[in-house]
């Protein structure tokens, strides 16, 4: 089983506490990141694990202090979530803010651990089976669904339910399982993207969507219903991309844009991308097609990673665009309060809430 980088860091910190390298408090995150040669994100995740395990206590804007008496968590919570295809080696996790907030604020008597799965066949099933073999009181899951919203591993989730494990689905809402789920509205997602496109006041508005995304079909239906009959609105679906194939993505975008019949001399193009992997490719495609100064933006989840990957070899202004907020904190708050209630009141509740995504304003830096 692959060990995540933050888990290795957690073990290193524990060893340093045991060897009295750290006696009363941990150094600041920047110093820890330099010491262990990892990112500050990995340090944050490692400290969150130590905090929920009762090893350290964090005081906001002060630091993390080593507890003299180690607390034993009363409840064990697992989070099952996907890694990004072919980007997992970089430690990128979708909606990390939601999961980190859950681990940080669920409570000191809760211990949270993560199980990640990839796109490989059977990966999610293997992760679920690992959790089933352990004592667990609650489960947060970003589950794999079929095209019609059915759980791919329904039988394993049913085993959790029969064992009395409290289950909450995040960002994916299965249609065939009695549990709580918190997600964002797919219609709201489409409206947010198109409203941002329209704010640029360009005659041509294009949405670039990933063919393999689990919600592409639903989003396309909303787009066709809301904007399908309006001139100048185009929906384009592309193959999945990764950081090593951005040039190929640009070629796909060129081919698809040519199919729309948009004039090569068009001076008014605005493009919304499902993620940052398409932004750089879309920029290249527009340059090749002769589109002058296109407005391009995305949900922004990978912005800083991609910018750092190019090590300053690309124009930073390309990554100074609006980003879509997926209401990570709002979803986390609902997920925390519901899980606490179900576990501490020994009850099961079916509760769902959909949040409308919204766009933040133009950003002045890549890290915004």
Image: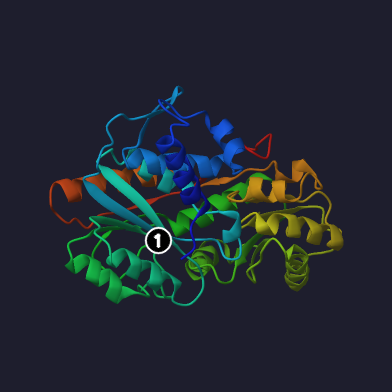
On the rendered structure, is 46 left or right of 231?
left
The image's colouring method is rainbow
Let me know if residue 274 appears in the view.
Answer: no
In the image, 266 versus 219, the foreground residue is 219
Residue lying farthest to the top in this orientation: 62
Task: Name, please, the residue furthest toward the left.
Answer: 346
Q: Which residue is mark 1?
A: 142
Going by the image, does 297 lie left or right of 11? right
x and y, in percent, of residue 237 in the image? 63, 69
Q: Position of residue 126 (x, y in %)?
A: 39, 72
270 up-or-down from 221: above or below: above
Whether residue 21 is visible, yes or no, is: yes
Q: In which quadrant of the rendered view does residue 257 lie? A: bottom right
Q: Nearer the viewer, residue 222 or 274?
A: 274
Percent coordinates x, y for residue 298 in the rendering: 62, 52
Q: Which residue is depicted at the point 60% across and 55% down? A: 90
Can you say whether 163 is above or below 148 in the image? above
Query: Left of 268 or right of it: where is 335?
Result: left
Q: Left or right: where does residue 230 sit relative to residue 151?
A: right
Along the viewing direction, whichever of 80 and 269 lies nearer the viewer: 80
Element carrying mark 1: loop
Pointer 1: residues within 10 angstroms few (<14), some, or many (20+)? many
Question: Picture coordinates of residue 55 (x, y %)?
Answer: 34, 37
Q: Quadrant of residue 233?
A: bottom right
Vertical relation: 48 (above or below) 165: above
Q: Residue furthest front?
A: 19
């Amino acid at each position: 089983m692959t060990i995540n980088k933050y888990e290795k860091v957690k073990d290193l910190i524990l060893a340093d506490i045991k060897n009295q390298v750290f006696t009363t408090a941990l150094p600041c995150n920047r110093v820890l990141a330099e010491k262990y040669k990892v990112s500050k994100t990995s340090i944050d995740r490692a400290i969150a694990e130590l905090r929920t395990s009762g090893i350290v206590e964090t005081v906001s804007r002060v630091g993390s202090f080593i507890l003299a008496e180690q607390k034993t968590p009363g409840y064990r919570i697992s989070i099952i979530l996907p890694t990004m295809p072919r980007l997992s080696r970089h430690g990128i996790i979708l909606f990390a803010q939601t999961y980190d907030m859950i681990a940080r604020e669920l409570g000191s008597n809760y211990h949270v651990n993560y199980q990640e799965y990839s796109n490989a066949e059977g990966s999610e099933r293997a992760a679920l089976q690992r959790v089933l073999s352990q004592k667990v009181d609650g489960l947060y899951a970003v589950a794999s669904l079929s095209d019609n919203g059915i759980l791919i591993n329904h039988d394993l989730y049913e085993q959790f339910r029969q064992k009395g494990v409290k289950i909450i689905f995040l960002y994916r809402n299965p249609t065939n399982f009695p549990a709580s789920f918190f997600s964002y509205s797919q219609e709201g997602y489409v409206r947010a993207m198109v409203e941002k496109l329209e704010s640029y006041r360009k005659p041509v508005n294009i949405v670039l969507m990933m063919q393999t995304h689990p919600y592409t079909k639903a989003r396309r239906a909303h787009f066709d219903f809301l904007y399908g009959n309006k001139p100048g609105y185009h929906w384009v679906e592309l193959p999945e991309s990764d950081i090593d194939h951005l040039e190929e993505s640009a070629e796909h975008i060129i081919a698809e844009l040519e199919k729309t019949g948009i004039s090569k001399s068009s001076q008014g193009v605005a493009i919304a991308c499902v993620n940052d992997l398409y932004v750089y490719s879309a920029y290249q495609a527009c340059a090749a097609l002769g589109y002058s100064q296109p407005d391009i933006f995305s949900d922004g989840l990978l912005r800083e990673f991609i910018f750092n990957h190019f090590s300053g070899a690309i124009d930073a202004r390309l990554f100074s665009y609006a980003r879509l907020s997926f209401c990570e904190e709002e979803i986390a708050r609902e997920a925390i309060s519901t899980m606490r209630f179900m576990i501490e009141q020994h009850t099961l509740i079916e509760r769902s809430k959909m949040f409308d995504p919204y766009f933040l304003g133009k950003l002045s830096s890549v890290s915004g």
